[in-house]
């Protein structure tokens, strides 16, 4: 197996988009918008922004999409939605420093292993080393030292083990939707953007009953406008609505050109960009551990090329 240069560039560009929309999402969270309303509003922007491209594709070959293709879209949308819900629940019942590193690290690990087994993507010896370095780097960058510190404090056992369960479960969902989506665009050759856009539509329909709960006396239309175009969140909603699907679309395009077992951990290079953007835009200090983790990830990429 090889990692083509064009696939690597797609992954890196997607990682930059992913890190950027997360910066805007964090800014919106600081301002106090409802997470469900924010996700729903971002989805609406995504559906509108990419509708022309999707309509063109569907007009040309929608009739060729099999029942399996539509089943994968629904399955993928369900897994993505479960991921979002479980992530919020995890942050509510456990520490961020436990849930986040386990979710991202185990997700990349499980996705690579599933792709290797289910999609027959067997790396060479030096590529195994590259995958290992990237996954270790993910854990280090995302703060695995915090988890190790938490494990050394017996008084936090209940909250710690809750975080362990949520983190691994979320990582499992990440792995499942990564492999499902990789199979859809790689083996079934479904158009990546149209496939993902259709999943966003399904997810939007799923969360609409909760997102569209509005105060008595306010019309549904005015509430929708307020959710999608509220002045304090407008820029964040638009940025997330465009950059989030763009980031994943680029990853799916990469999955069509490279092994999914490579794409899954490489997507987490977004942490490097997030680290740089956090230092630049949010003035966050970067500990030595993150620099070490970033270095491991870069070395791992070298062994994959």
Image (cartoon, rainbow, N blue to C red):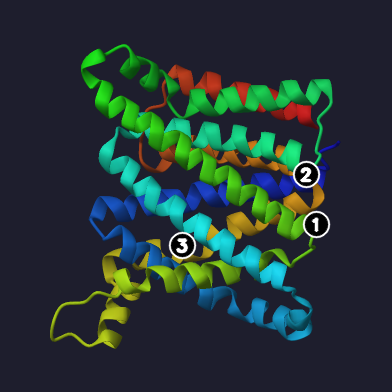
Q: Are marks 1 and 2 in contact (CB under 8 Å)?
A: yes
Q: What is the secondary structure assignment of the residue under circle 1?
A: loop
Q: Which residue has dot 3 on it?
A: 239
At horizontal 71% and vertical 30% (from top left) the residue drawn is 301
Query: The residue tagged with tag 2: helix, strand or loop?
Result: loop
Measured Cα–Cα span from mark 1 to mark 2: 9 Å
Quarter of image, res 37: bottom left
Above-or-below relation of 33 to 166: below
State which tag comes first along the sequence, 3 or 2.
2
Can you give x and y, in whole percent of width and height, for residue 150 in the image? 31, 19
| Above-or-below relation of 255 to 288 | below
Query: Would you call the spot at circle 3 few (<14 residues within 10 Å), some (14-19), or many (20 or more)?
Result: many
**Image quarter hosting the C terminus:** top right
Q: Which residue is mark 2?
A: 119
Residue 138 at what x, y percent from top left? 54, 29
Residue drawn 79% across and 62% down? 188
């Amino acid at each position: 197996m090889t990692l083509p240069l064009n696939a690597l560039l797609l992954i890196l560009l997607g990682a930059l988009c992913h890190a950027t929309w997360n910066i805007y999402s964090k800014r919106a969270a600081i301002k106090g918008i409802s997470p469900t309303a924010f996700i729903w509003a971002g989805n609406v922007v995504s559906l509108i922004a990419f509708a022309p491209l999707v309509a063109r594709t569907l007009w040309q070959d929608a009739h060729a999409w099999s029942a399996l293709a539509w089943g994968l879209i629904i399955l993928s949308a369900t897994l993505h939605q479960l991921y979002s819900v479980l992530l919020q629940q995890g942050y509510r019942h456990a520490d961020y420093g436990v849930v986040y590193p386990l979710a991202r690290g185990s997700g990349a690990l499980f996705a690579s292993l599933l792709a290797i087994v289910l999609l027959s993507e067997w790396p060479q010896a030096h590529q195994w080393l590259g995958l290992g370095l990237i996954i270790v780097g993910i854990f280090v960058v995302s703060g695995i030292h915090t988890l190790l510190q938490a494990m050394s404090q017996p008084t936090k056992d209940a909250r710690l083990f809750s975080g362990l369960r949520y983190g691994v479960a979320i990582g499992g969902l990440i792995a499942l939707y990564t492999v499902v989506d990789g199979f859809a665009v790689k083996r079934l050759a479904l158009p990546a953007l149209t496939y993902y856009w259709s999943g966003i539509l399904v997810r939007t329909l799923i969360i609409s009953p909760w997102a569209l709960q509005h105060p008595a006396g306010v019309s549904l239309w005015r509430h929708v406008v307020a959710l999608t175009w509220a002045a304090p969140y407008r820029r964040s909603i638009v940025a997330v609505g465009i950059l989030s699907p763009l980031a994943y679309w680029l990853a799916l395009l990469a999955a069509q050109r490279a092994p999914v077992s490579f794409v899954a951990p490489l997507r987490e290079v977004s942490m490097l960009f997030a680290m740089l953007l956090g230092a630049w835009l949010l003035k966050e200090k970067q500990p030595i551990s993150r620099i070490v983790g970033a270095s491991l990830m870069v070395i791992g990429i070298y062994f994959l090329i």
